[in-house]
Image (spheres, helix red, strand yellow):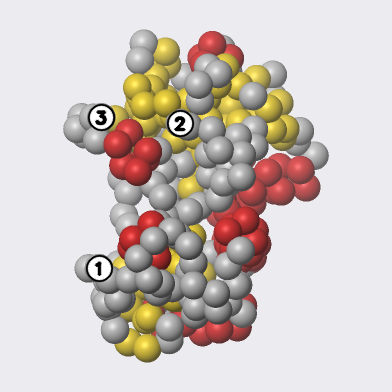
Amino acid sequence: MGASTVLVDGRARDTIGIGDRGLAFGDGVFRTIAVRAGRPLNLRWHLRRLASDCAALGLPVPGEALLAGEIAQVAPGDGVVKVILTRGDSTRGYAPVPGAAPTRIVAGFPPVRHEASRARDGVAVRRCSLTLSEQPRLAGVKSLNRLENVLARAEWDDVSIAEGLLGDPRGHVVEGVVSNVFVVKDQRVRTPELTRCGVIGAQRERVRELLGAAGVECSEADIGWDELEAADEVFLTNSLIDAWPVARLGSRTWPVGPVTRRVQAMIAQDDARD
């Protein structure tokens, strides 16, 4: 996997069986967690989202103490941890084997270093031609089935483009290839409704919580592409970028706005308390 340390079901190894349903069918979920000085950031929301995703797929949820201990083992300093849970091994065919033991993978990687200018000055993004399919039963879930995102990311190789934005068949903005999207209009913040498709990120949920605690309205809604372009500010979130202002989409440009700056400061303050 290219990781510096990998645990599979608590044991130091970096292989799984070819019959594992995560490999065969993408039958599982995952989370990507930033770790600073041995502290997993925003772990509370990562665990909440992991539990919700496991419930959607009918997977058992590992205990918090178990996961925290394994994260500490693979990332004792600064790094990135990927937690993968699959339904485990099965025979050939889609039907799961009753009582099969799930597979738990906790892998540590070196920290990701992004150019400071991306958070400071904002990033250029593009609209992807790929349209997300709708499946309400999996909406919000960060499953191992990420082929749509893989194909969308393959649409460009321009290093000046930091992210691609994805939409649904109804003409709504849904998310970025690796991020969630927020738009600001008249100091009111909205993020796309994710009940038909898309992934609910732990950072997205933390930002919504932090804004609410600060008395800033942040609603979920269907957002059209024209509404995104009419926004006063647009920013992206995930656990490795925190919050990036969007500076350009095609010919539309934005300054870095005060709400985005406030969100960046909120995340930094919350990380310091974490």
Q: Amino acid at mark 2?
A: Leu
Mark 2, Cα crowd under 10 Å, few <14 / some 14-19 / many 20+, is some
Q: Amino acid at mark 3?
A: Glu
Horizontal arrangement in the rendering, residue 46 relative to residue 219 (left or right): left
User: Residue 130's x, y, as percent?
Assistant: 36, 26
Q: CA distance from mark 1 to mark 2?
A: 27 Å
Q: Are marks 3 and 1 in contact (CB under 8 Å)?
A: no
Q: Amino acid at mark 1?
A: Met
Q: Determine whether the residue tagged by mark 2 lies in a helix, strand or loop.
A: loop
Q: CA distance from mark 3 to mark 1?
A: 24 Å
Q: Earlier in the sequence, mark 2 or mark 3?
A: 2
Q: Quadrant of residue 163?
A: top left
Q: Residue at x 27, y 71 (%)?
A: 18
Q: Which residue is mark 2?
A: 132
Q: Which residue is mark 1?
A: 1
Q: CA distance from mark 2 to mark 3?
A: 14 Å
User: Residue 243's x, y, as percent?
Assistant: 50, 42
Q: Residue at x 40, y 57 (%)?
A: 26
Q: Earlier in the sequence, mark 3 or mark 1?
A: 1
Tally of numbered discs: 3
Taking depth in this image into account, of 214 and 177 the one nearest to the observer is: 177
Q: Which residue is mark 3?
A: 155
Q: Earlier in the sequence, mark 1 or mark 2?
A: 1
| Residue 269 seen anywhere in this rendered image of the structure | no
